[in-house]
Image (cartoon, rainbow, N blue to C red):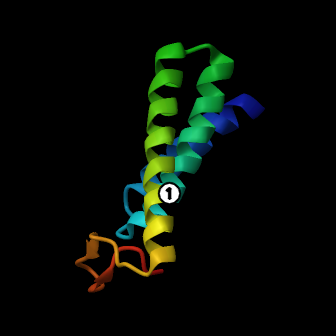
């Protein structure tokens, strides 16, 4: 039962992350989803899904790192939120 919670949690977080307009929020939620699905698939021994979720998690970490570097340097990100009219890394 607890194992199934990781699968459902990861699936719900993945779907919710896709609705985010802000890249930073999208990346954090998507990373959390990947980690939950990675745990679920690893315990279920579904290794192709483990490989895909590992790759996506690493991509998310790289983008989060890039956003963090840009924010620390004070340079705006290239992403732009059309819905709210702000730079993508704004809350």
Classify mark 1: helix, strand or loop: helix
Viewer-proximal residue among 87 and 20: 87
Q: Which residue is situated farthest in the right direction here?
A: 2
| Residue 65 location (% of width, % of height) | 50, 57
Q: Could you tell whether 85 is left or right of 62 in the image?
A: left
Q: Could you tell whether 24 is left or right of 42 in the image?
A: left
Viewer-proximal residue among 21 and 63: 63
Viewer-proximal residue among 3 and 22: 22
* On screen, residue 56 above or below 71: above
Q: Residue at x 43, y 59 (%)?
A: 66
Of the 4 image quadrants, the one containing the N terminus is: top right
| Residue 50 location (% of width, % of height) | 53, 23
- In the rendered image, is residue 47 in sight? yes
- In the rendered image, is residue 1 in sight? no
Q: Residues within 10 Å of mark 1 (few under 14, many from 20)?
A: few
The answer to which quarter of the image holds residue 81 is: bottom left
* On screen, residue 57 above or below 83: above
* On screen, residue 48 above or below 90: above
Q: Could you tell whether 77 is left or right of 30 in the image?
A: left
Q: Residue at x 35, y 69 (%)?
A: 21
| Residue 35 location (% of width, % of height) | 60, 40
* On screen, residue 83 above or below 41: below
Q: Residue at x 52, y 31 (%)?
A: 54
Q: Residue at x 61, y 45 (%)?
A: 9
Q: Which residue is mark 1?
A: 65
Q: Could you tell whether 20 is left or right of 39 in the image?
A: left
Q: Which residue is situated farthest in the left direction here?
A: 82
């Amino acid at each position: 039962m607890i194992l199934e919670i990781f699968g459902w949690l990861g699936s719900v977080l993945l779907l919710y992350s896709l609705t985010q307009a802000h890249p930073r929020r999208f990346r954090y939620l998507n990373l959390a989803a990947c980690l939950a699905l990675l745990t679920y698939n690893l315990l279920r021994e579904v290794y192709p899904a483990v490989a895909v979720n590992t790759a996506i998690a690493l991509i998310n970490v790289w983008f989060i790192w890039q956003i963090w570097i840009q924010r620390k340097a004070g340079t705006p990100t290239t992403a732009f939120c059309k819905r709210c009219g702000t730079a993508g890394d704004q809350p």
